[in-house]
Image (cartoon, helix red, strand yellow):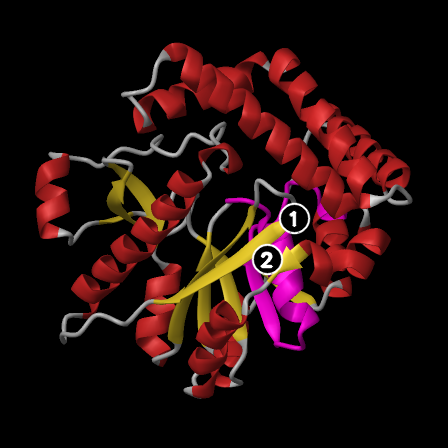
Amino acid sequence: MDRPPLAKRLKRFLRYLLVRAALALVHPLPLGLAGWLGVRFGALAFLLAGGERRKALKSLTQAFPELSEAERLALARAAFRHLGAALFEVGCTAALDRELKQRVTWPEAERRVLEEALARGKGVVFVSGHVGNWELLARRVASEGFPCQSIAKETSDPRLTALVGRFRERGGVRSIWRGQDGAARHMLRALKGGEILGLLIDQDTKVQSFFVPFFGELAATPRAAADLALRTGAAVVVGFCQRQAQGGYLLTMRDVPLPSGEDREEAALALTAALSRHIEEAIRRTPEQWVWMHQRWKTRPSGEPSTLASRGSAPVPAR
């Protein structure tokens, strides 16, 4: 494989140093102070990162056309502040692990959803999105001794990938990187072993996808979760870790039944659409806690969207 140009390698190295320096500064802080600083950092980013701010406002216009421009601006600002707080909280690893169970509430009824899914003995495909704090979601579940692995995309810098992997592993969550050799085999082995396999499917990424509705518009949505569940018979659970107005986070979980029928392609599409609906519902509960700067509707279907939506037979080709 060709090495990237020197300028790109230098940029990646400087970014890595910046991340390490930020972690060194945040790591010893109390969680409350880290979150406070994160909110200020997010507010500053909203002012300075004009490109990301414009992307967020464009996404919010598409998702909430009924809101006024001022309301969408306030929502975008709140989203930047929330993301800053979530990032800084995750950086306080020592304090985070000490206070995790107090900070992230997991009601017994929500826990039973996961326990009953695991009791079926075929593993659990656990689906979530970039809502609230997805890193705390996985860490909280793993803190109770549940075997967890997450499927994630490698970053452009192997050093950052390793950094993220170490953070998750210290919290009891192993990572399966999509680009690694044997990734599919590791996923199937995890489910066969009765483990929880976590996937985030709310972004337009370079993977095999279906076009399914998302805030009233067709969006390219990864199909891997549906394919894995249908192939293995694993239970499917959607779950989220969302910040509460009174402070802290709350875990919510729901079992999603597998579609009936013999046509695997139609079943995969139906399940992907159902999972996307659950993610949209979670975002609508706390719209300021989603990553609106992501260009969710960037990839468009070829042909008439209405035809594709009704037929549901055309996955997005890998790009």
Q: Magenta span covers which residues? A: 131-160
Q: Amino acid at mark 2?
A: Leu
Q: Amino acid at mark 1?
A: Gly
Work out whether mark 2 precedes mark 1 in sequence or the reverse, and give the earlier one.
2
| Residue nearest the observer in this picture, 186 or 73 | 73
Please report the residue visible at 37 percent of the width from the left and 79 percent of the height from the top: 232
In percent of width and height, residue 220 lies at 32, 42
Cα distance in 3D space between marks 2 and 1: 12 Å
Name the secondary structure under disc 1: loop
Name the secondary structure under disc 2: helix
Q: Residue 88, located in which quarter of the rendered image?
A: top right
Q: Which residue is mark 1?
A: 248
Please report the residue visible at 63 percent of the width from the left and 27 percent of the height from the top: 81
- Residue 3 shows in this picture: no
- Residue 312 shows in this picture: yes
Q: Which mark is residue 137?
A: 2
Quick one: label 2, few (<14), some, or many (20+) residues within 10 Å?
Answer: many
Up-down relation of residue 8 to residue 107 (above or below): above
Q: Which quadrant of the figure contains the C terminus?
A: top left
Please report the residue visible at 52 percent of the width from the left and 80 percent of the height from the top: 189
Q: Say if the magenta span includes residue 121.
A: no
In percent of width and height, residue 239 lies at 47, 59
Up-down relation of residue 102 to residue 141 (above or below): above
